[in-house]
Image (cartoon, helix red, strand yellow):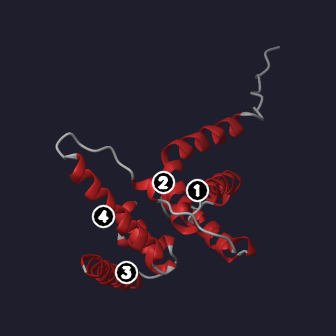
């Protein structure tokens, strides 16, 4: 008698696929999520912890992902929420270290060492002013300019309307311009 052989469902196959998906997320988004977390918490080791927690949550909750947005948007949203939770916690009553090392870049062969140092100083001044912005303005600047989110995706990540995103972006630019102008005026005196 010929029996139809039933395929045995592999209990490990979904786990293997989920692990591959997780590895892909870590490779593709790990650095950017860590930088995003750092922009909120201003501590490198805490940012690493939040990034790891983001991937753990995403791994555990992937079945609830409705695919109404990109994975990137979903991961950024998780990271932002974890950062905000961390900032609300009592653990945040500590000293924040400066994070200018994230903006270090390799100088091109076209610029002189003096030009490189001047540009580095300007970048650090800009970063310092961005990190001093109120949360709602800082996150808009970082996500729009550094992470290159468009207005629609920003609105989705931040749970707000596109018009609110535009208004916050305009106000954040104004604040940065005022602060950098004021800082430049006080340095030249």
Task: State the SS at label 1.
Answer: helix
Q: Nearer the viewer, mark 3 or mark 1?
A: 1
Using the image, determine if residue 91 lies above or below residue 148: below
C-alpha span from label 4 to label 2: 22 Å
Using the image, determine if residue 1 lies above or below residue 111: above
Most distant residue in the right direction:
1
Residue depicted at 27% across the width and 81% down the height: 181
Query: Left or right of 179: which side holds 43?
Result: right
**Disc number for residue 44:** 1
Query: Left or right of 112: which side holds 41?
Result: right
**Disc number for residue 122:** 4
Quadrant housing the C terminus? bottom left
Instruction: Assess whether mark 1 and mark 3 are in contact (beta carbons under 8 angstroms).
Output: no
- Per the image, the residue denoted by label 3 is 172
Residue depicted at 59% across the width and 67% down the height: 96
Task: State the SS at label 2.
Answer: helix
Quick one: label 3 or label 1, which is nearer the N terminus? Answer: 1
Residue depicted at 42% across the width and 67% down the height: 142
Residue depicted at 54% across the width and 61% down the height: 38
Quick one: label 4 or label 2, which is nearer the N terminus? Answer: 2
- Per the image, the residue denoted by label 2 is 32
Give the image location of residue 163, x and y in percent. Answer: 37, 84
Task: State the SS at label 3.
Answer: helix
């Amino acid at each position: 008698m010929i029996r139809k052989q039933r395929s045995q469902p592999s209990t490990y196959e979904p786990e293997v696929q989920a692990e591959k998906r997780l590895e892909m997320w870590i490779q593709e988004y790990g650095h950017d999520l860590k930088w995003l977390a750092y922009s909120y918490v201003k501590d490198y080791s805490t940012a690493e912890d939040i990034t790891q927690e983001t991937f753990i949550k995403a791994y555990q909750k992937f079945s609830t992902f409705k695919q109404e947005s990109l994975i990137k948007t979903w991961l950024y949203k998780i990271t932002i929420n974890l950062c905000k939770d961390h900032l609300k916690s009592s653990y945040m009553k500590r000293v924040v270290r400066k994070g200018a090392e994230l903006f270090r870049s390799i100088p091109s062969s076209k610029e002189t060492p003096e030009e490189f140092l001047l540009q580095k100083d300007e970048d650090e001044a800009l970063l310092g002013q961005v990190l001093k912005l109120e949360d709602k303005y800082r996150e808009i600047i970082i996500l729009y300019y550094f992470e290159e989110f468009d207005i629609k995706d920003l609105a989705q990540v931040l749970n707000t309307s596109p018009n609110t995103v535009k208004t916050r972006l305009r106000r954040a630019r104004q604040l940065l311009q005022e602060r950098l102008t004021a800082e430049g005026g006080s340095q030249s005196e």
